Image (cartoon, grey):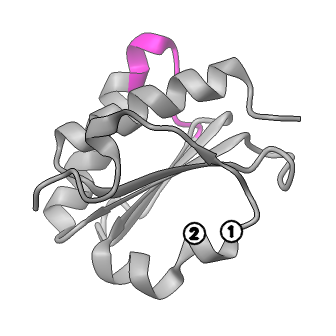
Amino acid sequence: MPATERALELVTTAAAAAADKLATDVVALDVSDQLFITDAFLLASAPNERQVRAIAEAVEEKLLPLGAKPVRREGEREGRWVLLDFVDLVVHVQHSEEREYYALERLWKDCPAIEVPAAATPGDAQA
């Protein structure tokens, strides 16, 4: 079963919010066939802890008007990998080094990609 319309709406909004804060390598994956706890993952990178936190805050702020509040938030204090769980969507904002090391895209490589706004696609954001 593919990701719900609600999950896709959240992905699109979250990806745009991340791109607005200059996130790099923004990728969305439909994990609904692999996981029962969520429909989609959004992955985004930043070169430093301050920007990781800013991206996470922007995503949370932009999803609030859609009635989405994170039920779980992890990693904000350290700022190396912030996880925001919106039930239908789990957002991973990672420091570039963590993103490379943990390589979530490889772990979930069998999951289909979800199209994100053009401004959020890899290579389009400026560092």
Q: Is residue 120 above or below residue 127?
A: above
Region of the chain picked out in magenta, as a range: 63-71
Q: Could you tell whether 104 is left or right of 58 in the image?
A: right
In this rendering, does residue 69 appear at all?
A: no
8 or 92: nearer the viewer: 8
Local packing at callout 1 (Cα closer than 10 Å; few below 14, some 14-19, many 20+) is few
The quadrant in which the C terminus is found is bottom left
Q: Which residue is mark 2?
A: 105
Disc 1 and disc 2: Cα gap in Å?
6 Å
The quadrant in which the N terminus is found is top right
Residue pictured at 30% horizontal, 72% vertical: 95
Residue 106 in the image: state x and y as whole percent.
Answer: 62, 76
Residue 62 in the image: state x and y as whole percent.
Answer: 33, 24
Residue pictured at 51% horizontal, 33% vertical: 11
Residue pictured at 26% horizontal, 38% vertical: 119
Mark linked to residue 109: 1
Q: Is residue 122 above or below residue 32?
A: below
Mark linked to residue 13: none
CB within 8 Å, label 1 to label 2: yes
